[in-house]
Image: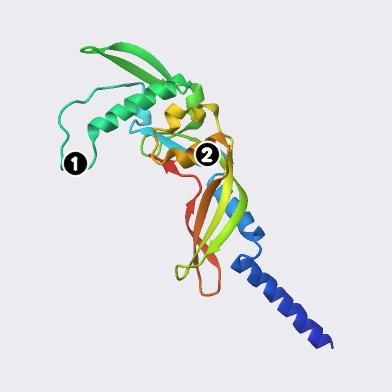
């Protein structure tokens, strides 16, 4: 009798673990995804980083320039458009108090402005690949499903919202400059949950290893 009870307990335990792995109970995935985000973002202020441009720390105070001429069809990077976008971003972030802005002269009839980081700007700055402003912490709300269609991989789909979102990023003039800003808009305004996904590889013993996280990133 004791042996039969033991077998039933083992079977029940195995079925519980199976339900966790197959997505019948998403609690474990929610906890894991939250932990992974917090490990990657220990300060709770770097879930999303928005790139201003290739202006490095030793280049400040930075004076804008104007680039003109024909676009090189063999160059995939449009230097003129990139420079114009940098000038615009500096101006917009200055209006939000992250840069100082000083008129220092003219290039023909075009004004030349000099920018430097304010104390407020330094709270958010990150220097990976130039000047970036970072903010936010992912808070997982609900696991929506599990996708095992790729052999040896598992994708966990979930919804989340961001906390620690500063007021300056709620300016549509700023967030609409970034590609695919629809998801960013939802995240910073907090009106609706945002969909995220974590991709895992599955080892032979069933353990999951994170390959890629899609909940917060550097945005060019």
Disc on the earlier residue, 1 or 2: 1
In the displayed structure, 129 sits above or below 97; it is below
Residue 53 x %, y %: 35, 33
Label drawn at residue 100: none
Q: Nearer the viewer, residue 183 or 74?
A: 183
In the displayed structure, 17 sits above or below 137; it is below
Label drawn at residue 186: 2
Q: Nearer the viewer, residue 162 or 145?
A: 145
In the displayed structure, 57 sits above or below 12; it is above
- Of the two numbered discs 1 and 2 in the rendering, the one whose residue sits closer to the viewer: 2
User: Horizontally, is 196 left or right of 108 in the view?
Assistant: right
The residue indicated by pointer 1 is 75
Secondary structure beneath label 1? loop
Residue 82 x %, y %: 28, 32
Secondary structure beneath label 2? helix
User: Horizontally, is 78 left or right of 118 in the view?
Assistant: left
Image quarter of the C terminus? top left
What is the C-alpha distance between the residues marked 1 and 2?
A: 34 Å
- State the image quarter where residue 66 is shown: top left
Q: Report the residue at 53% width, 35% height from top.
A: 188
Q: Report the residue at 84% width, 88% height from top.
A: 1
- State the image quarter where residue 127 is shown: top left
User: Horizontally, is 99 left or right of 77 in the view?
Assistant: right
Residue 55 x %, y %: 34, 30
Q: Name the residue at the right extreme.
A: 1
Badge 2: residue crowd in 10 Å (few <14, some 14–19, many ≥20): some
Residue 123 x %, y %: 51, 29
């Amino acid at each position: 009798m004791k042996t039969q009870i033991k077998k039933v307990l083992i079977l029940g335990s195995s079925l519980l673990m199976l339900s966790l792995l197959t997505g019948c109970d998403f609690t474990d995935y929610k906890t894991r995804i939250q932990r992974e985000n917090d490990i990657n973002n220990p300060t709770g202020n770097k879930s999303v980083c928005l790139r201003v441009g290739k202006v490095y720390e030793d280049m400040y105070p930075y004076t804008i320039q104007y680039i003109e001429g024909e676009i090189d069809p063999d160059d995939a990077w449009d230097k003129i458009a990139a420079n114009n976008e940098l000038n615009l971003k500096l101006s917009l972030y200055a209006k939000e108090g992250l840069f100082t802005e000083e008129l220092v002269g003219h290039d023909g009839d075009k004004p030349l402005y000099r920018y430097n980081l304010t104390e407020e700007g330094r709270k958010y700055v990150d220097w990976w690949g130039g000047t970036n402003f970072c903010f936010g912490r992912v808070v997982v709300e609900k696991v929506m499903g599990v996708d095992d269609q790729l052999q040896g991989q598992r994708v966990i789909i979930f919804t989340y919202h961001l906390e620690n979102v500063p007021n300056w990023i709620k300016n549509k003039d700023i967030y609409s400059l970034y590609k695919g800003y629809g998801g960013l808009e939802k995240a910073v305004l907090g009106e609706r949950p945002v969909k995220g996904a974590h991709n895992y590889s599955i080892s032979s013993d069933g353990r999951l290893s994170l390959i890629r996280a899609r909940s917060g990133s550097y945005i060019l």
